[in-house]
Amino acid sequence: MARDEPDWSDWRRPGPTRSQRRVDVGIAAVVLVGALAMTVLINSMGAFAFGAAPGLTEQLIWSAALPVPLAVRRRFPLVVLVVVGVLFIAAQTRQIGDNLIPSIVLFLALYTEGAWQRNRTVARWSRTGVIVVMFGWLVLAMFLSLPWPDSAEFTSAAGPLDPRLASVLYSFVFNAMFFSAAYWFGNLAWLSAHRQAELARRADQLRRSQEQNTRGAIVAERVRIARDLHDVVAHHVSVMGVHAGAARRALDKDPGLARTALQTVEQTARTAIGELRGLLGVLRAEDTEDTEPRAAVASPGLDRLPELFTSARSAGLEVRHGVYGEPRPVPDAVAVSAYRVVQEALTNVVKHAGARTADVRVRYLDSMLEVEVTDDGRGATHRPDGPGFGLAGMRERIAVHGGELEAGPRRGAGYRVRASLPAVAVPATEDGAT
């Protein structure tokens, strides 16, 4: 077997369908009618295949008996082959007048065994056995029936070969072609059926794989939407909560402070609504040209980090910011992920850390972009309302780029979030845009 040839040994061809069984019955009926008609014609002409024949009634019985097994040839191919082989030899022993239709029946039986036998070992050896028996019968029949060279049948012989030898070679070549064709076409039909089954199996696998990929894409899209909504909403709502609380406490004692806090709440709400609209615009957009301006709203980058610092400072958190290394353009997706990590880290500091200061550092390394947020708060990861989605969202964002995220308490006090992202420099255009 060739190296790239598939392995057929484990496949078993399914049985014939109801429609195929009806076709077999139809074929048997057609061959039966043909056999009876051929017998009548041959007897009417007196052109008997063996020079003599039994009575017409017996010939018609033999002609009818041979095609009948073909009605179940695909259901019981081995049984049909054996029965047809036995009837074929018996009919020739009786020297019935026609030999054409019996040969066609034998061909169909051999072909069907090769095309429909589920056990390939049985298919191979059963056909080989029948062919050997048929050749043995052929040799015996020729030995008993061939005339002597000086008989009247060879009076017109003029070739260079002995007439008896030429007759033997002719019969041998003809029968070899006959049986080889039945054997080969049977194998070809079985291989064709297997390839069709394999194509159907692969098509089903492809369909299921596509369905699985579609489900995975839907889940991934839902996770992405949930992550983006969390990143957009959580930060601004946290800031709004802090200022709303400050306004409530200062409402009676310091109306001016309360007014300033409420203005911050209002401004933060508008900013949140703007980002949500941009995000929803990206989700609803149907073409690239429509998404580009909206994506700019919904996908902030490193250039908008100062807005986060301003928002966190307005909530009472002192934020220090440092940039290390030579700033350079980075892929938009990396910049968005870095921004969201800083945003989520500062949101957690404002909501849960009880910290006074936070330190944000952006480092441009050789092939990496690193952002780090530390604070001097409690350093605890426990939340009274259970674990949130922020840390999981950060890990998902970083994992998309093959980066690393470290998050945990610092020694002494505070908490550290550090994200490392692969960031190959993006070449700038002539006007300096990336």
Image (tube, helix red, strand yellow):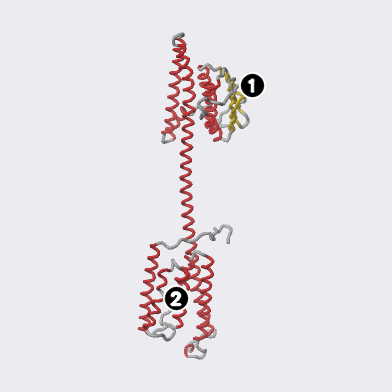
Q: Residues within 10 Å of mark 2 (few under 14, many from 20)?
A: some
Helix, strand or loop under label 2 = helix
Instruction: Give the residue furthest to the right.
Output: 411
188 over 213 or under it: above or below: below
Q: Nearer the viewer, residue 38 or 245?
A: 245
Q: Nearer the viewer, residue 330 or 219?
A: 219
Q: Residue 363 location in percent, x, y?
A: 61, 26
Residue at the location (46% across, 33% down)? 225
Query: Which mark sits nearer the N-terminus, 2 or 1?
Result: 2
Residue at the location (48% across, 44% down)? 212
The answer to whether one can see residue 137 in this image is: yes
- Dividing the picture into quadrants, the one containing residue 72 is bottom left
For disc 2, the marked residue is 103
Instruction: Give the residue furthest to the top.
Output: 253
Q: Quadrant of the N terminus?
A: bottom right
Q: Is residue 162 left or right of residue 412?
A: left
Helix, strand or loop under label 1 = loop
Q: Count the numbered circles shown.
A: 2
Q: Residues within 10 Å of mark 1 (few under 14, many from 20)?
A: few
Q: Is residue 375 left or right of residue 43?
A: right
Q: Residue 151 location in percent, x, y?
A: 49, 90
For disc 1, the marked residue is 412
